[in-house]
Amino acid sequence: MNLDRAESRTDCTEETGKRQSTTSRLYEEMIHLIESGQWEVGGPIPSERNLMTQFGVSRIAVRESLSMLRALGVLDISHGRSTTVRKMNSETLAKLFPLMLSMEGEQSLVHVFEVRLGLELQTARLAAQKRTADDLNRLTDLASRFDSFDTDTPESIESDHQFHVQIAKSTGNPLFWVLLNVLGSYVKYSQRESGKHNPEQHHRASTAHHEILDAITDRDPQRAQFCMERHLRDAHHITGP
């Protein structure tokens, strides 16, 4: 009797493994169809029945794969209407980016720092040159909001992110803040996952925000860039060149 139950569990596990493997393969093939343009943005994809025939898989595998793509914001699935491919935007990238980097391990933290450093040194420099009075008001409000917290919380992490995004917006180049918003999604993710609450680190970040803001206010690109680099190195705990 116990042997029968064990064999039953083994068969169930093997069946589950096969279904997950099929779903993963189907998911990858659907991604390829979207990337290659065979499934056009805004256009309908084949019905579930046609997908089952095309790929030789079960309805369960089709529905699981479609659900995965919908969760990532790649597909728009509405009852009573055809499923369509959604246009990829910064919101979609923001969902995908933390997931992709979390799979890369600890080394991805260094990669994020390198990209963030190159991006934000430029945004700080340009913001000091191009900022408006409205930009300064928004940055001042965001710096004050960050000051109102004593340590890292979801709210303080978000206010820190918005301060950096506003600097990017102050450049007048929309590509900067779109890219930073996507990159920042992983920074926020890693901060939340770390679970660290360091009042001293938070105070240093607060001081750095005001130093950057002062440089931007004074229209001093070099000082703004210097203060931003010092701030980012401290935030990522990287002291080397």
Image (spheres, grey):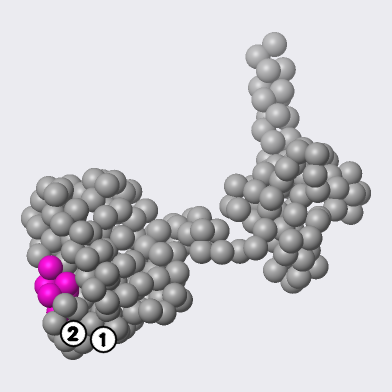
- Residue 129, numbered label: 1
Q: Position of residue 93 (x, y in %)?
A: 52, 62
**Within 10 Å of the Cα at label 1, are there few (<14), some (14-19), or many (20+) other Cα atoms?**
some
Instruction: Please tell me which residue lies in front, 93 or 87.
Output: 87
Q: How many marks?
A: 2
Give the magenta-colored segment's residue range: 210-215
Question: Label 2 amino acid?
Answer: Arg
Instruction: Please tell me which residue lies in front, 69 or 123.
Output: 123
Q: Position of residue 14 (x, y in %)?
A: 70, 36
Q: Which residue is mark 2?
A: 219
What residue is drawn where x is 80% and y is 39%? 80
Q: Is residue 120 above or below residue 162?
A: below
Question: Label 1 amino acid?
Answer: Gln
What residue is drawn where x is 37% and y is 53%? 189
- Residue 216, numbered label: none
The N terminus - image quarter: top right
Task: Give residue 109's quadrant in the image.
Answer: bottom left
What residue is drawn where x is 89% and y is 54%? 54
Q: Position of residue 36 (x, y in %)?
A: 74, 71
Residue 128 shown left or right of residue 68 in the figure: left
Task: Give residue 239's quadrant in the image.
Answer: bottom left
Q: Is residue 13 above or below residue 200?
A: above
Instruction: Please tell me which residue lies in front, 218 or 82.
Output: 218
Q: Main secondary structure of the magenta part?
A: helix
SS category of the residue bearing label 1: helix
Instruction: Please tell me which residue lies in front, 7 or 26.
Output: 26
SS category of the residue bearing label 2: loop
**Within 10 Å of the Cα at label 2, are there few (<14), some (14-19), or many (20+) other Cα atoms?**
some
Estimate the spatial distance between the alpha carbons at disc 1 and disc 2, rounded to whole Å.
6 Å
Residue 97 shown left or right of residue 231 in the figure: right
Q: Are marks 1 and 2 in contact (CB under 8 Å)?
A: yes
